[in-house]
Image (cartoon, rainbow, N blue to C red):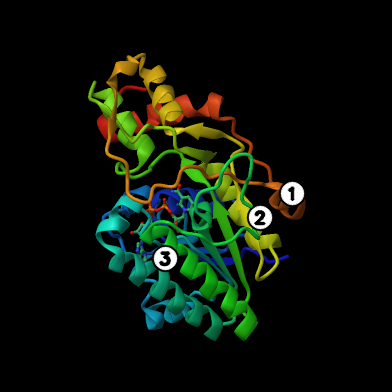
Amino acid sequence: MRQLRSILLTGGAGFIGSALARHLLKLHGLQRLVVLDKLTYAGNRGHLIGPDQDPRFSFAEGDIGDREFVARLLHDHGITGVFNLAAESHVDRSLLYPDDFVRTNVTGVAHLLEACRSHAVPLLQCSTDEVHGSVDPPRRFFDSSPLNPSSPYSASKAAADLLCSAAVKSYHQEVVITRSSNNYGPRQHAEKLVPTLVKAAFHDEQLPLYGDGMHIRDWIHVDDHCRGLIAAFKQGISGEVYLFGGACERTNLGIARSVLEVFAKPESLITSVSDRPGHDRRYSIDNTKSFAALGWRPQHKFKTIFPSVVRELAANHHGAQV
Ligand SMILES: NC(=O)c1ccc[n+]([C@@H]2O[C@H](COP(=O)([O-])OP(=O)(O)OC[C@H]3O[C@@H](n4cnc5c(N)ncnc54)[C@H](O)[C@@H]3O)[C@@H](O)[C@H]2O)c1
């Protein structure tokens, strides 16, 4: 069992990272939390609390690809574990700027691995179910499913996963890999599907859906994902992969309808736009291994919590009264 004492969290100013920071600071045994973030367009310092609110917390602006900087943080703060959530994370942008994705998601992870190795610090690498590509029903993804990425984003994440596995085999480094499905929750960047639909529905604009809107994703609440990340860091076996899904498969059309329902807006606002190139049809997660090995379960029910997430996104991005 790994202890959560002095933690470096990368990408902590992003959507999932800022939620994970909140979870980590609730742990009584935690002595220090250092967030390292490059503050790209996707990072928001305001998503995080300040050291005045919790003396265990500090923030460092920087790049995971800067080995010396990361090594200094590991040394100066006596870091005992790293969670890597820093990434370029938007599939559409990866089609336009694949280099950025290789720089952070692949080269950045290679450098982070080196820094962790030089300080003998365990790393949790947060990855995605998208590395497996599309799967037809009734099949699901297991940790052993082949890597079959379809976008520069998922290809860069798959490459990082392979670098992590190789580091375990070549250097006996301690690295645990997690792959979750689509997250929903507060503080998600406006470019992603749910916030895009919320914005359109709130302002009575057209809700854009790729193609026929029948692409299926599993949806997990960000807090369930964070609990999984912590369980995998503590109990996960080095070199192993743990999958986290919300046991909640929905078409994009279904998600758009759920958003409209919250605002009591008509379905006629939904509109089809040209499909994304290489758009995977379906992702589906088998949680069996994470249930058995980590004792983890998703706690949130989509039907119950999704409306409040929609209202919170509308309040934060568009000043709606909740
Ligand atoms: N959002 C999802 O549904 C989802 C699902 C599965 C896995 N993931 C993975 O979870 C992780 C976090 O995703 P997210 O949705 O919170 O992303 P996000 O885009 O909201 O946040 C990413 C954060 O990383 C920072 N960052 C980017 N490049 C950096 C660099 N070189 N050095 C340091 N910081 C850098 C950004 O400033 C930002 O704060 C990613 O690894 C992503 O692949 C996300």
Q: Residues within 10 Å of mark 3 (few under 14, many from 20)?
A: many
* 3D distance between C-alphas at marks 3 and 2: 25 Å
Q: Which mark is residue 156?
A: 3
Taking the spot 31% from the left edge, 58% from the top edge, the residue there is: 94
Circles 2 and 1, Cβ within 8 Å, touching? The answer is yes
Mark 1 lies on residue: 295
In front of the other: 302 or 39: 302
In front of the other: 4 or 194: 194
Q: In this view, does 298 lie to the left or right of 150?
A: right
**Quarter in which the C terminus is drawn:** top left
Q: Residues within 10 Å of mark 1 (few under 14, many from 20)?
A: few
Spot occupied by residue 151 in the image (x, y as percentages of width and height):
38, 57
Q: What residue type is labelled 1?
A: Gly
Mark 2 lies on residue: 231
Residue 315 visible in rendering: no
Q: Sequence order check: which comes first, mark 2 or mark 1?
A: 2
Ligand 1 is found in the corner quadrant, namely bottom left
